[in-house]
Amino acid sequence: MLPRTMHDCPLPPPASGRYQCASGHTLVEILVVLIIVAILSGLIVIRVGAFGAAAPAQQLDRLATLLTGWCEQAVFQQRNLAVRISHSGYDFWEPLTDTGATGVTDASWREAAQTQFSPQAWEGEVTAQLLVTGQITELDLDVPQLRCFASSQMTPFTLRLQQATRQRTGVQPETASLSADSNGRLRLLD
């Protein structure tokens, strides 16, 4: 239904005497909306990163949180627990038998069944290097390298994560390290 009075539409009446209103958006309105969307998209890409992967420091912070919880479980359950670090991520291990804090050899471990400690993959292209008691340790073993002891101690280690080098950008790859002493104190170094 067309407007009938001057107050309903700002355009002058045509020869028919009825007012007509223009519908749609102006070019300026459309451009303003597009500029706002472009700015917001740019901010999201900067915040999340080009590939959406978390930075090495964020990934190691997440590991530190999970590792703290896993080692607390070892103390509460009064049994040794373990963590395996690999090139693709990390997972949590428990003893095959409930022997308590003693009697667990390298061959007597299995992946943990607890869902809150499920295997985690490294995000993005990162390289991992693990030093256990000061020695470079092989990754992708069939046994865990890090132990959380029922006595609240842990295997001393340093884990270093480095983003893959990007040839085109010329930006130095980001690196971070997580280390633990034998008393289970974790330190994150950027």
Image (cartoon, grey):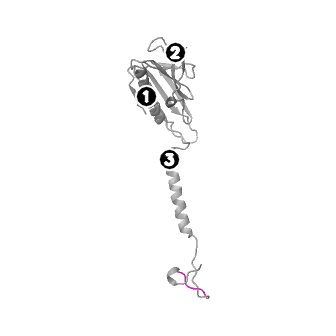
- Residue bounds of the magenta highlight: 10-14
Question: How much space separates mark 2 and mark 3, taking CA atoms?
Answer: 48 Å
* Identity of the residue drawn at 48% across and 11% down: 103
Lower position in the chain sequence, tag 3 or tag 1: 3
Q: Where is residue 70 drawn, in percent x and y?
A: 45, 26
* Residue type of the residue flagged with mark 3: Ile
* Identity of the residue drawn at 49% across and 16% down: 98
Front of the two marks 2 and 3: 2
Question: How much space separates mark 3 and mark 1, taking CA atoms?
Answer: 31 Å
* Residue type of the residue flagged with mark 1: Gly
Q: Where is residue 190 drawn, in percent x and y?
A: 43, 33
* Identity of the residue drawn at 52% across and 51% down: 42
The reply to whether callout 1 and callout 2 are in contact (CB within 8 Å) is: no
Residue behind mark 2? 97
Residue behind mark 3? 46
Magenta run includes residue 186: no
The reply to whether callout 3 and callout 1 are in contact (CB within 8 Å) is: no
Lower position in the chain sequence, tag 1 or tag 2: 1
Q: Dot 3, how many residues are within 10 Å of its Cα: few (below 14), some (14-19), or many (20+)?
A: few
Q: Where is residue 152 drawn, in percent x and y?
A: 39, 20
